[in-house]
Image (cartoon, rainbow, N blue to C red):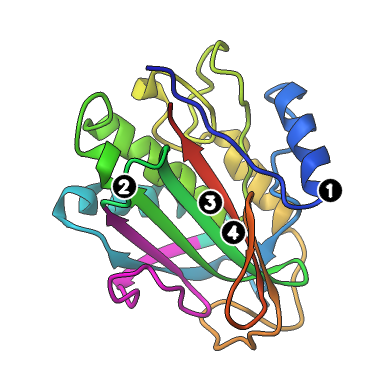
Amino acid sequence: MKKRFVGMAATQLAVLMLVIGLSAPAGASHSWGGYHWARQSNPFALKLGDNVSGVWDGNLALASSDWSQSAVLDTTIVTGQAKGNCRPTKGRVEVCNKKYGFNGWLGVAQIWLSGSHITQGVVKMNDSYMNSAPYNTNAWRQLVMCQEVGHTIGLDHQDENFGNANLSTCMDYTNDPSTNQHPNQHDYGQLVTIYSHLDSSTTVGQSVSSSGYSRSRSESYDASGNRVITWTLWTH
């Protein structure tokens, strides 16, 4: 079975970035459109809402620890507020797992934006696939968890060619997750670049107005008229 990550571009800019991402070398920038959490100091503290079952708890804890190694970011795991449907919460990221069906995707990351500032995010793990071979391994769970959380803090993929050698980062496409379960130094360096400036206000932990829009690699609109864009990790 072939595995692939597919980014469905929502705007012309996103299409351009996707094309560049497919052909760029591993050392190229992998910021996701410059999207970032607004904050007034570094490191900033981002809450990850734990809505996952026991089999995922260790993966969420390790992903939180890994991303907190960044010089600009500290994540903490808190009680989830997604209430079964992985509903977003302003100012934080909700992390969920569920049997979402055999719809072709392993994991999804979604962010909502106000301008270029992330205001909330969700991560979904699809147990319809992750509960059975070949994906029911800790290595696959860790790669998917690490990558989807990485998207919600503003990172794109480092490489999207499955035939290339592993880059030892979860932000890399691979058919073998054994060495791609954690961030690498390029991920941490990219976060420093993304968060090198400070903002006059913060979207972290705040009850942000719903007047912004949302980003993922597929486009839809929520009930408030916010645009939502989603990174989807597909398999087929």
**Label 3 amino acid?**
Ser
Observer-side mark, 3 or 2, equals: 2
- Along the line of sight, the residue nearer the viewer: 127 or 70: 127
> How far across and how far down the image is residue 124, in percent?
39, 55
Residue under label 2, please give it. Answer: 101
78 magenta-colored: yes
Give the extent of the magenta segment.
Answer: 74-98
Please tell me whether mark 1 or mark 3 is closer to you in this view.
1
Task: Decide if residue 157 is in sight here.
Answer: yes
Please indicate whether residue 112 sits to the left or right of residue 170 in the image.
right
What amino acid type should be assigned to the residue bearing mark 2?
Gly
Q: Residue at x 15, y 55 (%)?
A: 54
Q: What element does badge 2 sit on?
A: loop
Q: Quadrant of the C terminus?
A: top left
Label 3 neighbour load within 10 Å: few <14, some 14-19, many 20+: some
The residue carrying mark 4 is 72
Query: Mark 1 packing: few (<14 Cα in 10 Å), some, or many (20+)?
Result: few
The local crowd at label 2, few if under 14, some if 14 to 19, many if 20 or more residues have their Cα within 10 Å, is few
Comparing marks 1 and 4, which lies closer to the viewer?
1
Q: Residue at x 53, y 51 (%)?
A: 70
Sequence-earlier tag: 1 or 3: 1
Q: Is residue 98 left or right of residue 226?
A: left
Q: Secondary structure at mark 4?
A: loop
Using the image, tell me which numbered label, if any, was put on residue 121.
Answer: none
Specify which label sits upstream in the sequence, 1 or 2: 1
- Label 3 vs label 2: CA separation? 34 Å
Q: Are marks 4 and 3 in contact (CB under 8 Å)?
A: yes
Give SS at disc 1: helix
Residue of label 3: 70
